[in-house]
């Protein structure tokens, strides 16, 4: 009777093309999570400010920003479908946490809500730029790179609008934005892995 091998077969190293394809799916998965979170943040802030008198203009601005994030989210939903990939395993966690972040910063006041927007968009813009640079270096996925470039510009507009509206005057600005940025970066790392 032949001896049974108890060892696992060694995996072949991924080909460069497969490694890049896997990396691109990771990028899309993380970006999908980020855009899902942005929609939840803006939606929560609208709920809070929409219930307050005299906040119609702010609520409208937040609605317009949310609509822009929906465009991004829809694009990443399509990319995931086209590549037969799944969202991050953490998506069910990011949605409620993002809603709480949006509502919590809005309850702290308009400037804190703007500080939240600035912090989130700052990290996302930086993240998109890293992805653009990575695709540039690999000379790959020109359409995806163009999409990242466009979405990065949109995020910069949101960030700049938040600064213009008083983000830097938020109470405990450095502490608040530092906490939010750290959370965003941790979410990016976790979403890349699962």
Image: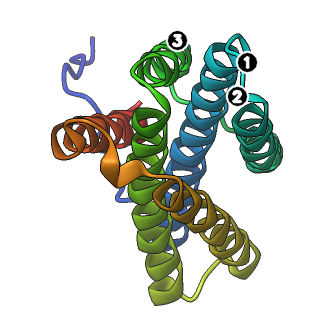
Of tags 3 and 2, the one toward the viewer is: 2
* Marker disc for residue 180: none
User: Are discs 2 and 1 less than 8 Å apart at CB?
Assistant: yes
Work out whether residue 35 or residue 159 is closer to the camera in this orientation and state it: 159
The residue pinned by badge 3 equals: 96
N-terminal of the two: label 3 or label 2?
2
The residue pinned by badge 2 equals: 55
Locate the C terminus by quadrant. top left
The residue pinned by badge 1 equals: 50
Of tags 1 and 3, the one toward the viewer is: 1
- From the viewer's perspective, is 149 left or right of 184? right
Is residue 163 at least partly visible in the picture? Answer: yes
User: Are discs 3 and 2 less than 8 Å apart at CB?
Assistant: no
Q: The residue tagged with tag 3: helix, strand or loop?
A: helix
Query: What's the CA distance linking mark 1 and mark 3?
Result: 19 Å
The residue depicted at 83 percent of the width and 45 percent of the height is 78
N-terminal of the two: label 2 or label 1?
1
The total number of labels drawn is: 3
Packing grade of label 2 (10 A; few <14, some 14-19, many >=20) is some
Q: The residue tagged with tag 1: helix, strand or loop?
A: helix
């Amino acid at each position: 009777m032949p001896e049974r091998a108890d060892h696992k077969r060694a995996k072949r190293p991924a080909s460069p093309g497969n490694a890049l394809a896997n990396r691109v799916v990771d990028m899309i998965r993380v970006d999908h999570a980020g855009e899902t979170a942005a929609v939840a943040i803006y939606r929560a802030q609208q709920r809070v400010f929409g219930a307050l008198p005299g906040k119609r203009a702010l609520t409208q601005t937040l609605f317009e920003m949310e609509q822009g994030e929906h465009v991004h989210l829809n694009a990443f939903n399509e990319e995931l479908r086209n590549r037969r990939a799944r969202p991050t395993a953490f998506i069910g966690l990011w949605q409620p946490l993002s809603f709480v972040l949006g509502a919590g910063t809005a309850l702290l006041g308009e400037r804190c809500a703007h500080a939240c927007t600035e912090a989130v968009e700052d990290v996302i813009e930086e993240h998109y730029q890293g992805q653009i640079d990575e695709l540039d270096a690999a000379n790959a996925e020109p359409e995806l790179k163009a999409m990242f470039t466009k979405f990065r510009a949109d995020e910069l507009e949101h960030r700049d609008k938040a600064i213009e509206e008083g983000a830097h005057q938020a109470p405990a600005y450095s502490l608040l934005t530092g906490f939010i940025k750290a959370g965003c970066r941790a979410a990016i790392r976790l979403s890349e892995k699962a």
